[in-house]
Amino acid sequence: MLFKFPTASQAREDEVTPHGLYLSRRALIGGGAAALALGGTAFPLDARAATFQVPTTRKPADAALDTVTPIKSATTYNNFYEFGTGKADPADGAKALRTRPWEITIDGEVAKPLTIGIDDLLKVSMEERIYRLRCVEGWSMVIPWIGFPLAELLKRVEPTGNAKFVAFQTLMDPERMYGQKSWVLEWPYTEGLRLDEAMHPLALMAVGMYGEILPNQNGAPIRLVVPWKYGFKSIKSVVKITLTKTQPPTAWNRSQPREYGFYSNVNPEVDHPRWSQATERRVGDFSRRKTLPFNGYGDEVASLYTGMDLRVNY
Ligand SMILES: Nc1nc2c(c(=O)[nH]1)N[C@H]1C(S)=C(S)[C@@H](COP(=O)(O)O)O[C@H]1N2
Ligand SMILES: [Mo]
């Protein structure tokens, strides 16, 4: 079986399986064992055939606790300040975002800098990853992303020995991204990771969700997803990735350095200066639940921070 969540007693299969994936899984099953053995398959280049055919390679962090958030919530309750600061703004405003033509440039401390069109990038093997997303504001979701490890992209450009950090940049387009005309943040939105964090197999470049092409409001055509960090690290609509010697500036850290650190690992023990981070509300739930260190991915990522004081490096 490709995946199992939540348990059969909780709901019918077609109720708990995101519909795009349900369709693609039927297609895989129809294709028999040969299709299953393929690993990832290419993204459909025709955007109208918007269903990915991928095996599920990563289950929710805890199948008993992590029911996938309804697609409706994940696509109508968003943070994407380029399209306004209200949760419902991006679903409407991001309709204006043009995702073709779209190129990503990867440069800086690399032996083979690369500029690649999104449709060529979409030919790489894709995986589905069902990840928790914990926003620094105290809410969370469980989202089935489709994408590939950021490490695959970075290996392709061959980081030099000087590369220690990775800087990311969102598209700058104030005409369509009208939020960029106001001074909420320094535009374009920027984010960064240490190189070893960026190379970690959990760090994903997502091009789809719920078995389908990424909706504009979720960061089309390609965005970063770092599940053990607060959501703002998962930068949307990326056009540039630069490997650097020194720690790059990041949009939220520039705007409120005391509130948003460079690392921003999910940490229930380090409160935001204006609220506690000990608990969170899963969107759709009534009550709050405990927030887990590293958002529940500590077994996999805690070793990246051995010897670091995570209260200082928040
Ligand atoms: N370019 C850009 N990326 C962004 C943001 C943003 O405002 N602009 N918001 C961040 C925040 S605060 C969160 S919680 C997540 C939300 O992702 P989602 O809307 O797909 O759930 O995107 C992050 N990436
Ligand atoms: Mo967030």
Image (cartoon, rainbow, N blue to C red):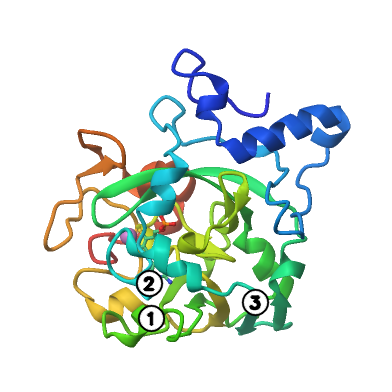
Which of the marked residues, 2 or 1, is nearer the chain's N terminus?
A: 2
Per the model, the C-alpha gap separating discs 2 and 3 is: 19 Å
Q: Is residue 239 above or below residue 7?
A: below
Query: Which residue: 29% across, 76% down?
Result: 253
Q: Which mark is residue 193?
A: none
In this rendering, the label closer to the viewer, 1 or 3 = 1
Amino acid type, callout 2 = Phe
* Residue 257, image quadrant: bottom left
Amino acid type, callout 1 = Tyr
- Quarter for ligand 2? bottom left
In this rendering, the label closer to the viewer, 2 or 3 = 2
Per the model, the C-alpha gap separating discs 1 and 3 is: 19 Å
Amino acid type, callout 3 = Trp
What residue is shown with label 2?
Answer: 83
**Cβ atoms under marks 2 and 1 closer than 8 Å:** yes
Q: Position of residue 10 (x, y in %)?
A: 44, 17
What residue is shown with label 3?
Answer: 102
Q: Is residue 250 left or right of residue 114?
A: left
Query: Which residue: 77% across, 27% down?
Result: 29
Closer to the camera in the image, 199 or 64: 64
